[in-house]
Amino acid sequence: MNTYRIGAVVSLAIALIAYPGENLQAARKRGPAPQAQENTQANPKDPGGHSARGVEFAKKREYDKAVEEFTKAIEAAPGDSKNYFNRATAYRGLNKFSEAFADYSKAIELAPQDARGYIGRGEVLLQQKQQDNALADFDKALQISPNDPNARRFRGFVYISKSEWQKAIDDYTVVVQKVPADGGAWERRGFANRNLKKYKEAIADYTKAIATDPKDPDVYRHRAQAYIMAGDSAKATDDLKAILKIKPDDVDAQSRLKALETRANVSPAPMTPAPATSPAKAPSMAPPAASPH
């Protein structure tokens, strides 16, 4: 869960829209896709069953076939925004962002009060590094649906990329309230808190992120840095050792651990006692890339 890479934030979290009664869900899991079942009953809202077949192809990540089916669905029902939204999502799976943008825009034209179209188009813009335009779409989605966790999640990332830390914290707070198991949101909020020098809050957020994925070395790394910045080298050392249990050849963790242990073992030369000062901080870790997790 590297929070700050675009692949993690703007992954193809397919939010395909199914017709009532189809019981078709988005393919969010990475496990084996369920086998498509033949629909023996005609659905008047899905002439020819093309939309249902497109969803099944998308679940199996056969996006080219999904595009073909959604195109047929559009031909059969050109006024249905869902078909454009679904085809846009399939185009994203093929990294055809211009086509995806056009289809999301058509879905918005047909259903301007559906927040999902703005969120989908905003994700495409984010992938194209058009942050200001993406922000406008997420803002519009949140005007329609103020607490939508997806819109808040993506807008929060834009705020992080702009170093608007408190705004990011506000958005990720809504996300973790709505989706407590979203480790990425906890981690990004921790990063924003850390940049505001709210180390106690950052450490608490990273701890929540670790609880959702205790095998992710990067979260321990971020928490270790927060501990270092807070002056707690002992707990930072524990986190760096935890990384090495997960990934023994992690060169960064090895280097930082050696630096902390060397510092702890250095005996000060005799000198005239002086007033106590705060512990020196280790060199700051380079912040994660500002491009989207």
Image (cartoon, rainbow, N blue to C red):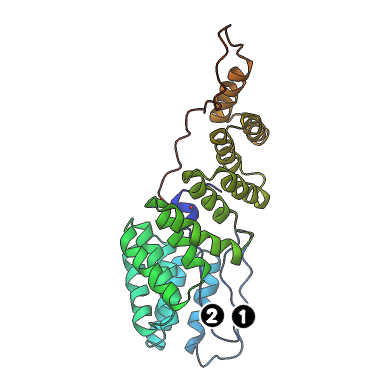
Q: Residue 10 at x, y = what percent? A: 45, 58
- Which image quadrant for residue 267? top right
Q: Residue at x 57, y 64 (%)?
A: 28
Q: Which residue is mark 2?
A: 18
Label 1: state its secondary structure: loop
**Residue 68 in sight in this render:** no
Q: Amino acid at mark 1?
A: Asn
Q: Residue 18 at x, y = what percent? A: 54, 80
Mark number, residue 196: none
Q: Residue at x 60, y 13 (%)?
A: 266
Q: Amino acid at mark 2?
A: Ala
C-alpha separation, residue under disc 1 versus residue under disc 2: 7 Å
Question: What number of labels is visible?
Answer: 2
**Residue 105 in sight in this render:** yes
Establish if 4 lies above or below 31: above
Cβ atoms at labels 1 and 2 below 8 Å apart: yes
Relative to 161, 153 lies left or right: right
Q: Residue 122 at x, y = what percent? A: 38, 66
Residue found at the far bottom of this picture: 44
Q: Residues within 10 Å of mark 1 (few under 14, many from 20)?
A: few
Q: Which residue is mark 1?
A: 23
Q: Residue 129 at x, y = what percent? A: 33, 55
Q: Closest to the observer: 148 or 92?
A: 148
Label 2: state its secondary structure: loop
Q: Closest to the observer: 229 or 120?
A: 229
